[in-house]
Image (cartoon, coloured by chain):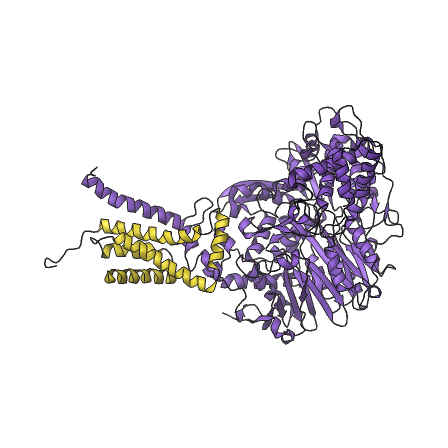
Chain colours: A purple, B yellow
Amino acid sequence: MRVPPPLRSTLRTGIPAFVLVTGLYAGFRSVGPVPALGPFLDPLHGVWAVAVQEDLPGQEIVIPALSDSVRVVFDDRAVPHIFARNVSDAARTLGYLHARFRLFQLELQTRATTGTLTEWLGPRALAYDREQRELGLAWSAQRDIATLDPDGRLSRLLLAYAEGVNARLEELGPRDLPLEYRLIGARPARWEPVNTLYLIKRMGYTLAYLPEERTRERLAALVGPEAAAALTPVNSPIQEPIVPSPRAPRADLFMLPPPSPPAAGQRGSQAGTAALPRGWAERGGAAVGSGGGAAGLPWVGHRGGEASNNWVVAPWRTANGYPLLAGDPHLDLTLPSIWFEVHVVVPDTVDVYGVSFPGAPLVAIGFNRDIAWSFTNTGADVLDFYREELDQPDRPSRYRLDGAWQPLDSRIEEYRGPGGRVLATDTLFFTHRGPLLREDGRAYSMRWTVLEGSQEVLALWEAGLARTVVQWLTAMERFRAPIQNGVVADRGGDIAVLASGRYPVRPGGADGLAVRDGTTRASDWQGELPPSRYPYARNPAQGFLASANQQPLDPAVDPVYLGGNWPSPWRALRINALLGADSSVTPDDMRGFQTDPGSARADWFVPAFLGAADRAAAAGGATAELRAAADLLRSWDRRYPRENERAVLFELAMTALDDALWDELIPAGDSAADREYTPTGAITAALLADTASPWWDDRRTGDARETRDAILAAALATGYRRARERYGDPAAGGWRWERVRHQNIYHLLRFRSLSALDIPVQGGPGLLNPSNGSGTHGASWRMVVELGPEVHGWGVYPGGQSGNPVSRWYADRLPAWTAGQLDTLPFPRTPDDLPAERRLGTTVFTGGTR
Amino acid sequence: MRRHLALVAVLAGAMGVATWWIGWWTVPVVGAAWGVARRGEDFPAATAAVAASLSWILLLAVQALGGPVGQLSRRLGGVLGVPGWVPLLVTIVFPAVLAAAAAALTGSLTPPARRDSSA
């Protein structure tokens, strides 16, 4: 076919013009999730420059605000040892290094707290941003910083740190931009001192946002208020408190009231939701299922279940005669890690080594020349809800208090998209207690210690300066939220534990597990516990102290209300048993304990399963499946090493047990997977003693009435059947624990190719090295310190110092972490003390202009 | 032929230097200039495309000397949901498309050069 000449001419011009315009458009403008291709693909200045970004800073760096030169020596694990002449310069240098290695992480966590992710991700992050702003985290941080003395130590520290971060931003060229900024088409924002407080608030949200009121309400709608209260008790039915008790460990008599049918018209979660607004109430659990909240990120949603271990051993129980301390905080595991390892030296002032949060000028967990410390989360109840009465539900301006109307504070919140366009505008209201949430004509305010003042940065900074246990405990009295169980030891041989932070005192000494009447000040908190009432122990006769998120105080010794629905004390039982059995503990023992494969939970439940199976067999009622399952379980040593082939049976039997036992907690018409709540393992364990409890009956079996043994035997048989279905014949190798249980460490933006997935570990539910559910949670840092004449430290975290996914320091520590190994941490007194074979490079930071 | 290869090399060099000094968008600009300069000749667009790809391949090779470009491509491919070699391929094709289109467009818009009758 011949093309007419005019058309041919038009095509000769039109086709290249179209291709060129399209190419240029794609080159200059992002299209959907695809970044602008020109700057992205540019082989020198675009994404490919990420491949050649230097792992370490150059030999000389200028931070304009420095008052003196600072020398930084990098060891062979890319840990900077900062030698500064004053604290401000040390903070500036740390700020620079955090930005140098973790710039994207710094800004992401800030945006996650301030609810400004829409500016990066667009409308898909709007729901998440709204939740964050409603919680008031950014509001409270801004209020806190406005009240700081600008010449005070905290202000100076935050400002110096910000100067360091911004020095890095100012030198940032196109080739230096981290990969993630290129992928989302964004540029880094300037760092403000308040950003550090956002980070602290975020930790409060992660560790102290525990709306137990919601849990109880939902349960009460299903099984009645008495049963709901018993399922989420103030006191753990198994006692192994942090503060040693002469009566622990023990199991208290536990009676679970029979379930009462829900009120007419109520149906499970719907009924519960009607009582407490969805926004705040759902937040605690919503992200569990969604795997990351509205923004789709692995860690921005609140998951709950954060846990940790720490313990400390007196010198008379150690092989070398020196105090030993171990700590492993369990958090959501991400790449890059939440931690950045650093050593900061200012002569005659500070010489501290440990892990810092990128975003804050402090070492949170670590050691100095005299002491070592580590934290676990206390999980205290520091959050209450109040039912409020408003003058106008739709456009409120006042709330009723003691018979009079009080004005509401308000704040306009704008949510902007990537181009700056306003996506939505909200008005947030606040009572004297805190943020107000309205839904369907109802209004609730919230009071939460996390929103009230912030001295945590200063407390942790001063804790790092302490030279004795007593000084450290004094420094930590300033710490308010989230309440932490700190263990500490010094070279003099003192050991201690203190659960420090602000504990609210409710009217009449009541607990904080119910929604309160907001129309009267009589409902307000009456003050706070004095530090003398904080859970505390020092140099106990047993010679060691341990915390693993269990109830801090034995209520039989001190019944003061600190919180409720405590995690099961399986890890506490295990570590106390290990420490109690070893009167000559070595640092390597401490390391081994951190990934110990033994399980107090299995010790409790395996005999129950086997007893039920044996009784069924004796009565002639054991099926072949049950007999086979019992034989396999009996041969298990109740340990979870990677090669074990029986733990999987036990875990599936435990799942089946929860499904059959807690059927009352499944809303009518829903399946077992939709169970409203699963009580802690300690509740189940305590219920084992009540063989005829109506809770053992599985309502789904009609008229049949099951007993404890019937449910246990059926659960064991079900676990066996499921194990065979999923993993094949037990002798075929498919039941190996390492093929079943994995850790999954996602990149901050959840890109699989930047993540480390399916990592087999020696760990499991209730173990000192916990590994549950999706495997995204675990030991974020492991540390052992020996406080001898010279302090020796060992540590590792899953990841590496660099946030650059193609850096050799991005995930270099994963093999050691996976194997339960610790790296030796060099702790030089001077730059020249670091052995040459462990020295990677030196950078001198100077002030002035570039 | 040798002269043609030399011209491609020169053009690739010009595009590479322009990308290095100024930025990616100089590739279609140089391609457009090439289209004007070589109007009426055979395949100026194809020549521009080959030179553009070649220039960016060389620049990528320089980068690869200093860092793990291949690893980065694999990770990027994972992020974008495509095989690991696709980001590299797109990086090579993108400048070629721009340069070829620019050369073809200017070649078609510019009047043919007046040729010496003795030529």
Tally the numbered discs.
Answer: 0
List x then y, in percent, for residue A764: 71, 48
Q: Nearer the viewer, residue A260 or A2?
A: A2
Along the line of sight, the residue nearer the viewer: A673 or A630: A630
The image position of residue A346, as x and y in percent, is: 66, 71
x, y (%) of residue B88? 42, 54
Q: Nearer the viewer, residue A114 or A595?
A: A595
State the image quarter where residue A295 is shown. Answer: top right
Q: Is residue A34 left or right of residue A288?
A: left
Q: Nearer the viewer, residue A619 or A184?
A: A619
Q: Residue at x 25, y 54 (%)?
A: B35
Q: Is residue A298 left or right of residue A374?
A: left
Which quadrant does the N terminus of chain A fall into?
top left
Q: Residue at x 55, y 41 (%)?
A: A425
Q: In the displayed structure, would residue A635 be above or below residue A708? A: below
- Residue A413 in view of the camera: yes
Picture quadrant where residue A134 is located: top right
- In the displayed structure, A294 sits above or below A223; it is below
> Farthest residue toward the right?
A246
The answer to whether residue A751 is seen in the rendering is no
Q: Residue furthest left?
A: B118
Q: Position of residue B66 (x, y in %)?
A: 46, 64
